[in-house]
Structure formats: C-alpha cells, structure tokens
Image (cartoon, rainbow, N blue to C red):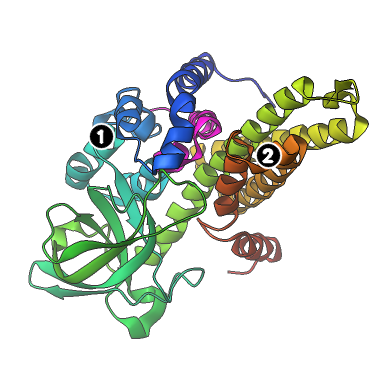
Amino acid sequence: MNFGLTEEQQMVKDQVTKFAETEIKPIAAELDHTHRHPEEICRKLGAMGIMGVAIPTEYGGAGMDVVTYVLCMIAISKACASTGVIVSVNNSLYGFPVNAYGTHEQKLQFLTPVAGGEVEGCYALTEAGAGSDAAALSCKAELKGDKYIVNGAKRFITSGNVAKYCVLACTTDVTKGYKAIINLIVDLKETKGFSVGKIEEKIGILASGTAELVFEDAEVPAANLLGKEGQGFRQMLSGLDAGRIGIGSQACGIGKAALEDALNYAKERVQFGKPIASNQAIQFKLADMATQLEAAELLLLKAAWMEQNHLDYEKESAMAKMYASDVAMSAAIEGVQIFGGYGYCKEYPAERHMRDAKICQIYEGTNEIQRVVIARKLLGAR
C-alpha cells in the first residue's frame, strides 16, 4: 500500500495550491460579499486543465486521474468553497456523464468547451417534488420526430444561472418511474422555450449561483440523448457516485481552511497572559479537527483510487462524502468557537467557513441518503 503521490500528482497539487493561495483566496471574501460568479478564475483554471481534470485531452480535459482531481478540489475549496463547487460540477456532475455515456460527436461538441474551461456546465436533476427521491421526476420529454419537447422546472441547480450546457434529467412517462428517465444534453443559451427562473438566496457558497431552470415546450434535438432511452437512471446514479467524491473533497477543503485559520488565531490570541493555544481545551479541539480531516481525506483518496481503477466505489464514495461533510461542519463550528466573538463577525473568515460547510451535508444526496446507500451495500440490497 503506497500513500505517496506520483511526481505528476505532486506537481499538479503544488501548482493548484499556489494558484488557490495567491489568486483565489485573496478575493474569496469579496466573492462571498458580492455573490459574483468568479468567471476570470474559471477561465484561468480552465487554461490549467482543472475544469476537466480527468477528462481525456481529446475532449479538452487534462487527461489526469481522479486522485489528482481530489487533490485539486481540496486545494481550491480551501481557498474558496464557491469556486470549489463550480469546479466540481464541471468535472463530475456534467463532465462525468457526458464523458462516460456520450458519443464521440457529443463529446467534441458539448464536453470540449466545458472541460477546457471556456464555458460552464451544470446538471439538472432536482425538482420541487423530486430531491432525495430521484426517480419521481415530473419534467417531461416527449419525442416528436427528431426532437424532444421538454416541459417542466428544475430547482437548486448549481451554476444554472451561468452555464451554457446542461445535462437534463427528465422522464418520457411519469407513470413508469425510474424506467422512463433519460438524460439530455441541452444548450441553454440556444434553446427556445428555456429560461432561468428564481435565483436562490442562500446562507453559503454565495459566489456559486443556484438557479431554477424552466422549460416550456423547449425543443432539444433527439441527437442530444445520452445513451438510449431506459438507461437514464443508471447513468444518474453513476454520475452521483462520481459527484460525491467532488463534494466530499469540497467539504474537506472547507474543513482544512477552518482548521488553519483557527490554528493561526489560537497562536496569536492572548488571554490571561498567554496564547489560547496553550490551553488544553483549545489543543483538544485542534487535535480532533486535524485527525478527523486527515481521515476524511484518506476516505476520499481511496474512493478516487477505486473509481480510477474501475472498481465498484458506490459505498466508498457515499462514506467519503458523508464523513467529510460531517467533519467539515464540525470543524467549522469549532473554528467559530475558537475565534469566540470574532468568529461570529465577518471580520474573520470563520463564519464563512461555517456557512459554506453546511450545504455539503445536503446537496449531492443528503447525508441521510448516504447512510441509506451505505447500509444497502452492507446488506447486499439492490
């Protein structure tokens, strides 16, 4: 068992960490305050290959591995959680299904510009009545000739307000449940009948837009179908498995930021004539944060390695996402506690880490759903 990184993995990790520290972290507070999409950062990350880390170079990506993707996601999310989730959606929720199930022609047209960082992609699954119950979709796609006519609305879609391309999960027959689910690639900028609806006001990841997508007799070419009808639900599940590694990595990055900030503050903050870091109560908090985050990172790297080696990683990705997001939330709360009153004020980033961490326990499948997935695998249930 080798815990060391390859020369390439270490080089990319160092490069991305330096970029995140020098170009992303200094503007993270401003992005949070203004809710501004970090377009210039996305373009630069695209030029570095990070908007499509594990996508083949033939289709605009960097052609690296999933372990490298985890390392990049942790470094970026440590600097700015909003930027982290934008990168995650590009790579996992959009990039994975198009790369795994798209035809050569579909990849050239719809994957290359997203993996290359020219434009953003998104994945539209959640609806008002379909969240954890992903098979209960009502967004309808009716095949008429060489086009699907799409009607329905999607909720809580990350990057939905800025994305050019979307993998849209919909149903051809609401009475058939998961068997009728399909995934369509939609050019959101060129599709008549599509509009961006409500932009959500959130407590965290504020530079990442979360939008409602509305389809009213929207026409999508039948050639944009991923795979075949009847394959959509399986595609969805595999895409979510991959996406959970990305979100777990985002959470781990947030937790590492909370730990680093709390550690530095504890060394500087003097009470009763000595730094608060000399108090055992603070030391125990820091030790627990560090240990739990290290364990989370190891779970993520194991899941990534399993995906890269084409093993069944459904349980491991669920474990990694669940544990990393729980640990990140705990670390962020403890970080605020160590900062004391300052932790509750926007003068320091501790409160931002806490606001950003919470969503990681919710999206990409709530942690309650992750526990269901894990239990089913343990029990051998389908």
Secondary structure type for disc 1: helix
Whether residue 95 appears in this view of the structure is yes
Query: Bounds of the magenta span?
Result: 63-87
Left or right of residue 36, residue 369 in this image? right
Left or right of residue 259, residue 153 in this image? left
Task: Name the residue carrying label 1.
Answer: 59
- Residue type highlighted by circle 1: Tyr
Q: Which mark is residue 343?
A: 2
Between 144 and 35, which is closer to the camera in this rendering?
35
Task: Give the x, y percent position of residue 259.
Answer: 69, 32
Task: Give the x, y percent position of residue 231.
Answer: 34, 64
Q: Quadrant of residue 51?
A: top left
User: How packed is label 2: few (under 14 Cα within 10 Å), some, or many (20 or more)?
Assistant: many
84 up-or-down from 242: above or below: above
Q: Which mark is residue 47?
A: none
66 up-or-down from 364: above or below: above
